[in-house]
Structure formats: C-alpha cells, structure tokens
Image (spheres, grey):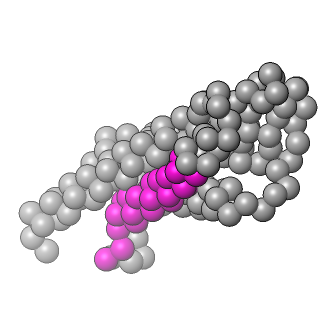
C-alpha cells in the first residue's frame, strides 16, 4: 500500500511541477513569421527576441489557461490529500484519503486533457493554416507528459485504496 502511495506521490509532484512549467512558459508553439522565428505560450508571444503580453481575449486561450490552472490546483489538492493519507488517524471512518487523492488526480488529468485538446484542436485547425512553417514546442509537450503523470498518480492511489479495502475486508471487526 505504501509503495503505491509513494509512487503516486512521486508522479503527482513531478506532474504538478510539469503543469506549472508548461503553463508558465512561452514555448507552446514555434513558427516562422516574416523570415524570423517566433514562439508563443499561453500568456506571451515572442518575435525578434522581444516578448509581448497576449492582450487579446481569445476564447480558446482563456479556456486553455483556465483548465491548466484548475488542473494544477486539483493536482496540488491531491498532493495534500496524498501526504495526509500516510497518517492513519482519521476523524471520519468512511472517508479514505487515498481514494480522495486518487479522485483529485483523475480530476486534474481531466482538466489538463481538456486544456490540451482545446489548444491542439484550435492550433491545428486555425493557427496551423495561418502559419505555414510551425510546430508544437516543449511547453506543449510538457503539458501532455504532466497529463500522463497525474493519470498514473491517480492509478497508484486508487490501487493503494483497493489494497487498504482488501485488508479491511479480511479483518473481522
């Protein structure tokens, strides 16, 4: 049980770091514009070694930002619940912290999946046609890796919960 929780906690911490780095950096997409390379993130775009804030309130950027922030917050809440699940004292007998942590990580996975799907769909269908020479960059890839890490953290914590439930079922009360 503790090995599953430890593996889940490791995946969750790495996933949360990757979520923060992915959300904060400016390399979601790289493209060539007027002969110069440019790159953009969720908050800024950079051209000719100068960066500018994205002041346009475009719906897909706002949705991607919101879902990435919600994903980071739910992953952090899952980490807190995961750390608390190592302690055995509980004021709620029916409340299992391992289960709660697993559910929070699955919620985080869902939010980052929504964010990445929205960004991918709009980029391929709209921006990909606008810029001829473009590609997704490392911040975008970190978002997908963070999704996998939060998913595996949820799997580990649900496995820890199932092991705890199996042990609880074999012991007579």
Q: Position of residue 162 (x, y in %)?
A: 22, 58
Q: Is residue 46 left or right of residue 59?
A: right
Q: Is residue 36 left or right of residue 94?
A: right
Q: Position of residue 157 (x, y in %)?
A: 34, 53
Q: Toward which corner of the image does residue 40 lie, by quadrant?
A: top right
Task: From this view, report whether residue 88 is shown above or below residue 4.
Answer: below
Between 19 and 130, the one lying in front of the other is 130
Between 13 and 109, the one lying in front of the other is 109
Q: Position of residue 168 (x, y in %)?
A: 18, 65
Task: From this view, report whether residue 31 is shown above or below residue 101.
Answer: above
Residue 110 visible in the snapshot: yes
Task: From this view, report whether residue 135 is shown above or below residue 40.
Answer: above
Residue 75 visible in the snapshot: no
Q: Position of residue 76 (x, y in %)?
A: 57, 55
Q: Residue at x 9, y 70 (%)?
A: 172
Q: From the image, give the main secondary structure of the stretch colored magenta.
A: helix
Q: Residue at x 60, y 40 (%)?
A: 128
Between 173 and 1, the one lying in front of the other is 1
Give the magenta part as a residue range. Answer: 94-122
Q: Is residue 24 left or right of residue 154?
A: right
- Whether the magenta-drawn stretch holds residue 145 is answered as no
Q: Residue at x 32, y 48 (%)?
A: 156
Q: Residue at x 36, y 74 (%)?
A: 95
Label count reads 0
Quadrant position of the C terminus in the picture: bottom left
Outermost residue on the top side: it is 35
Q: Toward which corner of the image does residue 67 lie, by quadrant?
A: bottom right
- Whether the magenta-drawn stretch holds residue 97 is answered as yes
Between 156 and 117, the one lying in front of the other is 117
């Amino acid at each position: 049980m503790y090995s599953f929780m430890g593996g889940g906690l490791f995946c969750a911490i790495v996933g949360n770091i990757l979520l923060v780095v992915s959300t904060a950096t400016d390399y979601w997409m790289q493209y060539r514009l007027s002969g110069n390379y440019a790159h953009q993130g969720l908050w800024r775009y950079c051209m000719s070694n100068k960066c500018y804030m994205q002041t346009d309130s475009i719906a897909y950027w706002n949705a991607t930002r919101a879902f990435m922030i919600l994903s980071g917050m739910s992953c952090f809440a899952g980490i807190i619940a995961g750390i608390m699940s190592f302690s055995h004292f509980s004021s709620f007998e029916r409340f299992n912290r391992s289960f709660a942590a697993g559910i929070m990580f699955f919620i985080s996975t869902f939010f980052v999946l929504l964010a990445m799907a929205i960004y991918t769909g709009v980029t391929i269908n709209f921006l990909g046609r606008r810029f001829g020479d473009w590609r997704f960059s490392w911040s975008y890839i970190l978002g997908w890796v963070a999704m996998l890490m939060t998913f595996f953290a949820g799997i580990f914590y649900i496995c820890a919960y199932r092991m705890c439930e199996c042990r609880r079922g074999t012991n007579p009360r």
